[in-house]
Structures are given as structure tokens and as C-alpha cells.
Image: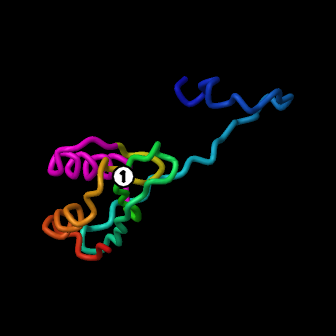
Amino acid sequence: MANNDWKDRLGVVFSTNPDYQYSTDEIEPQATLPKTEQRLRVSIEKNGRGGKVVTIVRGFVGTEDDMKQLGKFLKTKCGVGGSVKDDEIIIQGNLKEKIVTLLKADGYNNTK
């Protein structure tokens, strides 16, 4: 019965076909690339953040859990807060050089 959950069919109004099988276009999570093949970009942003400076890591290719794990690693090593959302790792503060150094020490070679 789990495959026939009504919450998955919220966009379907009505079907008169008794053999109708609703299907969704689920996207498979992309496998995480090895650290040496990741192309991470580290940048500083201030716009739209109430005047606060944040460091953003973009370009991570992999599962959301692995991205969250990398974000937790960076936040712990830097001793600051942050978040992981919209395929970005957001770290509070201007820590670009420290984050690039941490990423290279952890095995991420293609870091800018």
C-alpha cells in the first residue's frame, strides 16, 4: 500500500481508467564523486544577508547526506555556525582561506 499513497498523487484530479497506475518522475540521487574529482568553489557573499558576511562552498557533486557531512566538518573545524541548502554549504564569517586550507588538507584538490 506504500506505493499507492495519496500524498504522491496530489496533482492528479481524477482518472476514469480502472487500470491507471500513477507514476512519478523521481530523480535518483547522484553518486558522490571521490574527493580528488570534486571541483569546489569557495566564495564570500554579503548581499541579501543583513550585512553579514558568509563563506559559500559550491560545486559539490553527490548525495545530500555527504554534503551535510562536509558542511558539519567545516563548521566544526572553523568553530562557527552555518547551513547546507540549495546545493550550497554556507559558513558564517569571512573564512575563505581557512576553508580552502581545510578542504585541501582533507583531500579536495580542485578547490578555488
Q: Is residue 73 left or right of residue 13?
A: left
Q: Quadrant of the C terminus?
A: bottom left
Q: Which residue is mark 1?
A: 54
Secondary structure beneath dot 1 equals strand
**Residue closer to the observer: 81 or 11:** 81
Residue at 34 percent across and 68 percent down: it is 40
Q: Nearer the viewer, residue 43 or 30?
A: 43
How far across and down, in percent of the image, does residue 56 sit? 37, 57
Residue 19 lies, in percent from the top left, at 76, 33
Within-10-Å neighbours for mark 1: few <14, some 14–19, many 20+: many
Q: Nearer the viewer, residue 84 or 36?
A: 84
Residue at image point 56% right, 31% down: 3
Q: Is residue 96 left or right of residue 106?
A: right
Left/right placement of residue 11 relative to residue 84 reads right
Picture quadrant where residue 35 is located: bottom left
Residue 58, given in percent of the width and then of the height, sits at 40, 62
Q: Which residue is painted at 32% across and 43% down in the image?
A: 82
**Image height check: is 6 above or below 42?**
above
The residues colored magenta run 62-82
User: How far across and down, in percent of the image, does residue 107 sit?
Assistant: 17, 69
- Farthest right residue in view: 16
Is 81 magenta? The answer is yes
Callout 1 amino acid: Val
- Give the residue at the far front of this rendering: 51
Query: Which of the 4 image quadrants contains residue 1?
Result: top right
